[in-house]
Image (tube, rainbow, N blue to C red):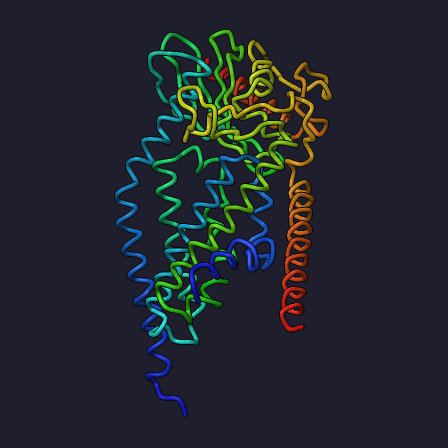
Amino acid sequence: MNAKKQLTEGLITNNPVLVQQIGLCATMAISTSLFNGIGMGLSVLIILTCCNVVISAIRKIIPGQVRLAIFVVVIAGFVTIVDLLLQAFIPALSSALGVFIPLIVVNCIIIGRAEAFSSKEGVFLSFRDGVFQGLGYTCVLVLMCLVRELLGSGTIGGGLLNGASSFITLDGTGAGFRIIPEGFGAGALVLPFGGFLTLGCLMAVMQYALRKSNEKKARKEKEVKE
Amino acid sequence: MKKVIDFVKPAAILLLVAAVVALVLGMVDSVTRDRIAEIAEQTKTNAMQAVLPAASYEQIELGAETPADINEAYAAEGGGWVVQVTETGSQGAVTLMVGVDADLACTGISVTKSSETAGLGAIASQQSDAGEAFRSQFVGQTGTVAVTKDGGIINALTGATITSRAISTGVTSAIALCETLG
């Protein structure tokens, strides 16, 4: 398995949110501003990569009967570490994401990759899988945040960009760039059901693009045969 | 027929993994604990300064009959009190700091902890013009504070008024508490 194939899988053909459709709960709940989206995406990426590496490293000694319990202990450990570090060093992000950081423990992306990938493959492959699947998750979150924030609140980069003292702020006070005047945004998109609408549209676009590219590939193969 | 070792081995490995994880967590906690406490203290002081500026605050011992929604009360140097109350909002607890001056009028509020609906009740805790406008309505209020729907003068954030009512209730009980103190 080469890196390019793993990257395409994580970002497109086996994207955790748009294709595997796992980890949707947090995706709906937090994708309301770019600050939240990038923060959550990177937290999941780091936790997923660490868990993948550790689980892959100890995969030979994990007894089959208690493997899920061991996965959960390892995952919960890394989630708590990230939670504590965020509270201590990026408190604004910690309070914006609130309960969704501890809830990464039960985010099925991580236990799903542990069960489906890292408990079977080598450490290096698992590391790459964690990074690429995490990137796929982050990309979808960022896309959803951009759409929902722009149409719902009328800004781009709220909390992260255009802060009082610098262009990029980590204290969550950035005002973002206002595209639509205040009060004219479709506030519904910021609510959870707006998240479902956005995600549904993204999935539809994704499926359409995947089918087009598959048809193209099939046609090419046919031509080669003829 | 399974041997004893077949049962003991998985349990022993699980225990080992859990012990290693616990050890690592203990180390991370010892590094971050002081900083987290410091940040919590700083957030609290900032909120208190925002609602009623004073050189120092002295915590007041609350009696057993204090209503359950009052968490803490502080006497500000130079008169007035800052009260921390917790009310039930639409998505969980809403914790706010309420400043009350010596004449029992509210000097300002600050929402320190809440998980209200984004785009609706969450405005109450945001550093935006809308949030500022909502919170500033409470300045100067006395006695019982209520939203317009309940016959008061506070313009609620949303039609459902859940967050706005919770905050009004909090301010009312803070003022009531200060009446017994002062």
Residue at horizontal 53%, vertical 10%?
B105
Left or right, residue A209 beside residue A103: right
Task: Note whether residue A205 is visible.
Answer: yes
A126 or A105: nearer the eye?
A126
User: In what quadrant of the picture does the C terminus of chain A appear?
Assistant: bottom right
User: In what quadrant of the picture does the N terminus of chain A appear?
Assistant: bottom left
Check the image and report above or below for B71 versus A45.
above
B137 or A99: nearer the eye?
A99
Left or right, residue B129 beside residue B83: right
Indicate the position of residue A138 as horizontal and vertical percent values: 50, 46
Task: Note whether residue B65 is visible.
Answer: no
Indicate the position of residue B8 as horizontal and vertical percent values: 34, 78
Q: Residue B34's image quarter?
A: top left
Tally of marks? 0
Check the image and report above or below for B80 versus A209.
above
Q: Residue A190's image quarter?
A: top right
Left or right, residue B142 beside residue A130: right
Residue at the bottom extreme, as displayed: B1
Indicate the position of residue A130 as horizontal and vertical percent values: 43, 57
Residue at horizontal 38%, vertical 35%?
A90
